[in-house]
Image: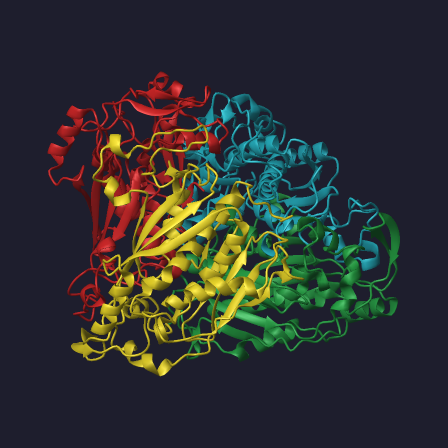
Chain colours: A cyan, B green, C yellow, D red
Amino acid sequence: MNSFGRIFRISIFGESHGLSAGILIDGVPAGLPLCDEDFEKDNERRRSGAKGTTPRKEADKVKILSGVFNGTTTGAPVLLLFENTNTRSSDYSKFTAIPRPGHADFTSSVKFGGFNDYRGGGHFSGRLTLGIVAAGVIAKKLLNNITINASLIEAGGMKDIEGAVNTALQEGDSIGGMIECRVNGLPAGLGEPFFDSVESLISHMIFAIPAIKGIEFGSGFSAAGMKGSEHNDNIISPEGKTETNHAGGINGGLTNGNELIFKIAVKPTSSISGTQRTINMQTKEMTDLQVEGRHDTCIALRVPVVAEAATAIVLADLMMLENKIQRIIK
Amino acid sequence: MNSFGRIFRISIFGESHGLSAGILIDGVPAGLPLCDEDFEKDNERRRSGAKGTTPRKEADKVKILSGVFNGTTTGAPVLLLFENTNTRSSDYSKFTAIPRPGHADFTSSVKFGGFNDYRGGGHFSGRLTLGIVAAGVIAKKLLNNITINASLIEAGGMKDIEGAVNTALQEGDSIGGMIECRVNGLPAGLGEPFFDSVESLISHMIFAIPAIKGIEFGSGFSAAGMKGSEHNDNIISPEGKTETNHAGGINGGLTNGNELIFKIAVKPTSSISGTQRTINMQTKEMTDLQVEGRHDTCIALRVPVVAEAATAIVLADLMMLENKIQRIIK
Amino acid sequence: MNSFGRIFRISIFGESHGLSAGILIDGVPAGLPLCDEDFEKDNERRRSGAKGTTPRKEADKVKILSGVFNGTTTGAPVLLLFENTNTRSSDYSKFTAIPRPGHADFTSSVKFGGFNDYRGGGHFSGRLTLGIVAAGVIAKKLLNNITINASLIEAGGMKDIEGAVNTALQEGDSIGGMIECRVNGLPAGLGEPFFDSVESLISHMIFAIPAIKGIEFGSGFSAAGMKGSEHNDNIISPEGKTETNHAGGINGGLTNGNELIFKIAVKPTSSISGTQRTINMQTKEMTDLQVEGRHDTCIALRVPVVAEAATAIVLADLMMLENKIQRIIK
Amino acid sequence: MNSFGRIFRISIFGESHGLSAGILIDGVPAGLPLCDEDFEKDNERRRSGAKGTTPRKEADKVKILSGVFNGTTTGAPVLLLFENTNTRSSDYSKFTAIPRPGHADFTSSVKFGGFNDYRGGGHFSGRLTLGIVAAGVIAKKLLNNITINASLIEAGGMKDIEGAVNTALQEGDSIGGMIECRVNGLPAGLGEPFFDSVESLISHMIFAIPAIKGIEFGSGFSAAGMKGSEHNDNIISPEGKTETNHAGGINGGLTNGNELIFKIAVKPTSSISGTQRTINMQTKEMTDLQVEGRHDTCIALRVPVVAEAATAIVLADLMMLENKIQRIIK
């Protein structure tokens, strides 16, 4: 299902090398000021260009095609569109027969009977995160006293991220990374019992982002090796403030008013310069594959802003469900 | 929202010390043989009693209250009910004022204005996983040539799980654990693009299980420290078989036909015998807290069968979406 | 899908002659006083016994199996169960081979490959409206200053409803009826644009009730023959009060603050005493059919309370979406 | 919620005088040939220009912005966009203060706190049916052996529709109309029990179309005045063919394999030339209102193709749920 959320609800569409990518957002409260410039900062953070990211450059200028009138949202669905302009599709035609290791070439071809748009990963491209970032801009505006900060804290297993990227560039290889996201200013009691726990909803959204392979909240995987006496966070104020924060700000699936913290693991970019082995689906024989074209050395560099947006989208929806964001902004 | 799934869709309800816990399942295909005995094995795996688990013992006998006729499912919703019989509610009354560290006492009280059923965690109790396990029994029957196996591979940070539990028992402490789940026999192409990636759906369900704090697919968090040349799985057969399986059986959010593997982190049981510090919400002052009552030393011992059920539920739904399980079983 | 609603969300289950029928309700605000007696009045209105209704009598005593603690709702899902006790299933076995005209025997058998519970209509029985009425009781409590009144205004085409029923009883025939539902006290602005217009949601729920074949809002089908100058309702107060009410209280799919009015058509009970013609699915030949067993002469007599409940359920959900009912009742 | 459907799922957006209107469709099977020309015929049927319809003329040329590659659908979401070009917004500015009788001016302003796009009805405009018609084109292609035909059978209460329109034009008034829709070639067993009955789903979609005030299936409101012996349709073939069709092709909410028939009532266009009475929301006093601008004398003339599309959308989804339309078209 291409949709997510209950009140603040997003529906995604688009392809890497088709005409467009974007997002349709339902349930945006009326009366929120919104203009093209609002999207620039986060789009810029997401955009390629830094060392370790793909040389493909798109203007990535948003078009607000519905739901905004006289500079504010109207309460009707908001369509945000990004046109694709800088595409070089001839790079990709051969991957229909020869699926790239690590990519969705094989799986999407099986799923859609070969009718999938294979160019640049098509609908499975990281380019679709443009829509997530854009929806996140609106969600962040709704969460006005809540701050969400994600950052890359490790790349290729190293804290010296720039060094790790340089080494990988020299080797023609790619590297993964670890991202930490912290949210402050949340009220206690967000999240719904059982299936719509805060962890459930955030992980659902986070794993929709291409290349994510793990998520942990608070002490996460370390908690598996801890004792209860170490892990339990003593409560030290009537507002629920805790002495430690092993729970990552969530108890019983609900926010507890402390900092919400989670980490996510980003796998190395699947496209690498080196020779790889795969199958030629036409000849049914194994073959060498050399992936050319533009790609990121460390896709994780571009993920923090996407993770923030994903988090903001989930939290905006939960805040609306709790009536902490009204349907008309005054 | 207390529901999950698109066609094979479950809705959960119940409390630890109320009258019942259970699950309502929509979209179960007609014609599936189903009887009370089908639930016994997995319920027994989940039930308390082993060393390290709570001495509370419930019969946990399922009542099939709708959707089955003459020994087979009818296509109508299936209601599975478990009555609560062995409850000692007086143990819990004081936690309304004095929230236990690590529990949902504080957060659920905030969310529901103090109207929540606080006895034994109420709706936030691990007892609700009875319904998940029961729905999992049906899902597993639908996935008849697909095998799902979850097991506890570490407890308290140790591979010697029995030893770890014994130590914790002696210390009056609790420990967490790590669970690995492996699925074999899956077709390629399951999962939906973007929001309903296989990782998104499985993690959503897994984090609904109380005490889970992390999940990783394939090489997961290790992938964050790897190079693309290490992580990419070479494809070695026209059916998509890969040489290695760092992807954990998923590319682009879709199954690739290889073994699906993920690991989950279970935090230590929040209830421990030792003295803890928390706030008395009435006096607004800090206080010592001694949690009595029955509880598990290592709740992770009981999670594998729940994780299997959660996985089966997600996969049954995806198989139905792909028409690989028909709406009438013949 | 056996569920309906976005926040106040119901999931239905059960069979006419199985063990139970009932409803599971998610999103019920916490803090609403609720006890068994609350259900008696509307259940009594729905129950059989009046002239023209089936002689089958069930106690129809609700069991509140989850979501209520110390006499108030907790915010967790509420399960309401009705056990079936007074069933005579042998009456129905032959309809597997010989489908009754007007009933779901043929269609449900096709849909579920013959695995459906055919006894008394099984899951397609009017008995399932017990759950709707019960959920409606809760919805009405939430809508405390809003009044919903439905009544039978015609039966068998006559305003003299008692006379019409008597005649039909003498003839061994059944009759249909027309019901009018009026809602007062609604705020303006309920309903969501386009797909979740008030008419869309109410009609969706109303047509879930067995035997309903038509619905019209305000002047409805008469409007098709009117001129705009006749049909338009002049607005005569700043609160939106209109001079006439041809719109039935809805403009653009949203409530306008005037009385919400709609009418629904109930077909005659399908079970009649006279001989009917149908097919024997085993011999593939036409045959006479004489339907015995207990049935209503005029099922429409029992529909008003169900229609009220359906309406209340929709409106409670819309009020919650607009934050006009909070998630904690104070 | 701006979305509808479970597998074949549409999400609508747009405004009458904003930049665009359109629709996003999820769940479209892969492999369906699709090009711009496919939309022309139904768009032409919907377009203004005939006598009795508004003189506003839009090119209404579809832009397929995602989900199609090399002339066939890919399985990814399909975005269909219509740009608005021929708009004259100055006509509408005064309706913010002076709501037009029969329109959504008042209700949408209340709902969205005055932030709604009021121009030409904004998001509440009949122009949004462009998206419905476009999605219907795809749905009809999927339902290839099923025929759906809707036609206007009465206008202003008369069978002589052209005469009725001419009279209304001369009088500067508007008229309503009655539309009949017939579907042939459906299998038996479509529809889901209870909430997703065929009547529930079709009525939900139909009432999303602006100006619809009633719907009836088969003999509909006449059934309320009938006897069971008249209304029941004798079954005369093992395939479920019935002698009469008072049920309109639906029993128990499921299709029975006979012709599906329903009628809908369209109210007169709200915009009329004559003077009307309404409130000036600024002065709080009543005032005369003269609605100028372009509008339809008989909006019902344009509804048949929209009703067909709405029906096709519902049926395509139900066919996919029953696996009668596969997710890859071969």
C44 horizontally vs A320: left or right: left
Identify whether D151 is placed above or below A84: below
Image location of residue D297, percent across then percent down: 22, 29
Q: Quadrant of the C terminus of chain B?
A: bottom left
Above or below residue D86? Residue B170 is below
Residue B200 at x, y = what percent? 56, 50
Task: Identify the residue at image location x=37%, y=72%.
Answer: C116
Please give left or right for residue C225 compared with residue C308 in the image.
Answer: left
Q: Residue at x 88, y 53 (%)?
A: B287
Whether B43 is drawn above or below A76: the answer is below
Provide residue D89's location: percent of width, then percent of height: 36, 19
Image quadrant of residue C55? bottom left
Q: Nearer the viewer, residue A11 or B62?
A: B62
Residue in the picture at 18% in, 37% down: D156
**Visible residue check, residue A251:** no
Identify the image quadrant of residue D301. Answer: top left
Residue D290 in sight from this viewpoint: yes
Q: Nearer the viewer, residue D242 or D325?
A: D242
Give the side of residue B275 with respect to residue D30, left or right.
right
